[in-house]
Image (tube, rainbow, N blue to C red):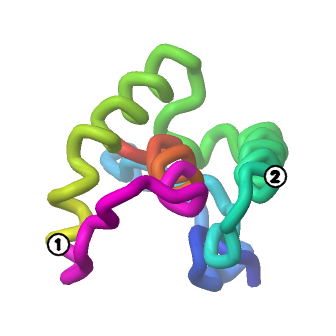
Amino acid sequence: MRWVVGRRVPDDERVTDPYDTGRPAEVDISNVTTRDDVVGVIHAMVNDLRKHKDDWANTSLDTYLDALATSIEDIEQTYTERGETMPSQPSWKLVAELLVSASAYE
């Protein structure tokens, strides 16, 4: 088992269907509260990308940055769909969440 953005998944769960969009980086962001935590998330994302590049939807800088911009644009809708209130001020955890979500966002 491994962690994928706060959930455990079997080691053999891989993207095999050509219509799958990819999975997000396997990084636990549940305890992110500081800038250093976000730096750790980024390092973990790089390691995950190197190990599981075929599983990510956005493996080039241009597709990742485009997905990151879209993730930021859609963040209020994402919170609404989850039944959560959008924070009035961004947090380090929100930054980490956006970075990780962009790894699979289409």
> Quadrant location of residue 81?
bottom left
Residue 24 in the image, given as x and y percentages of width and height: 53, 55
Viewed as shown, does residue 32 lie left or right of 87? Answer: right
Q: Nearer the viewer, mark 1 or mark 2?
A: 2
User: Residue 22 placed where, x, y %?
Assistant: 47, 50
Question: Which residue is identified by label 1?
Answer: 81
User: 64 or 35, which is in the foreground?
Assistant: 35
Residue at 58% from the left image edge and 29% from the top image edge: 59
Q: Is residue 7 above or below residue 68?
A: below
* Region of the chain picked out in magenta, as a range: 81-95
Instruction: Report the quarter where the C terminus lies.
Output: top left
Is residue 94 magenta-colored? yes
Helix, strand or loop for disc 2: helix
Q: Nearer the viewer, residue 69 or 13?
A: 69
In the rendered image, the quadrant that contains the N terminus is bottom right
The structure residue drawn at horizontal position 73% and vertical position 50%, both measured from the top left corner, is: 35
Report the Cα–Cα distance between label 1 and label 2.
29 Å
For disc 2, the neighbor class at 10 Å (few under 14, some 14 to 19, many from 20) is few
- Whether residue 16 appears in this view of the structure is no
Locate residue 79: give its quadrant.
bottom left
Q: Looking at the picture, which amino acid does disc 1 mark?
A: Glu
Q: Name the spot of residue 37 as percent of width and height, x first.
A: 77, 58
Disc 2 designates what residue?
Answer: 36
* Left or right: where 94 falls relative to 81: right
Rendering coords of residue 34 (x, y %): 72, 59
Q: Is residue 3 something one can see in this rendering? A: yes
Which residue is pictured at 62% across the width and 81% down the height? 9
Residue 45 inside the magenta-drawn segment: no
Please tell me how many numbered marks the rendered image carries.
2
- Does the magenta stretch mainly form a helix, a strand or a loop? loop
Kindly identify the amino acid type of the residue bearing the numbered disc 2: Asp
Query: Which labelled disc corresponds to residue 73?
Result: none
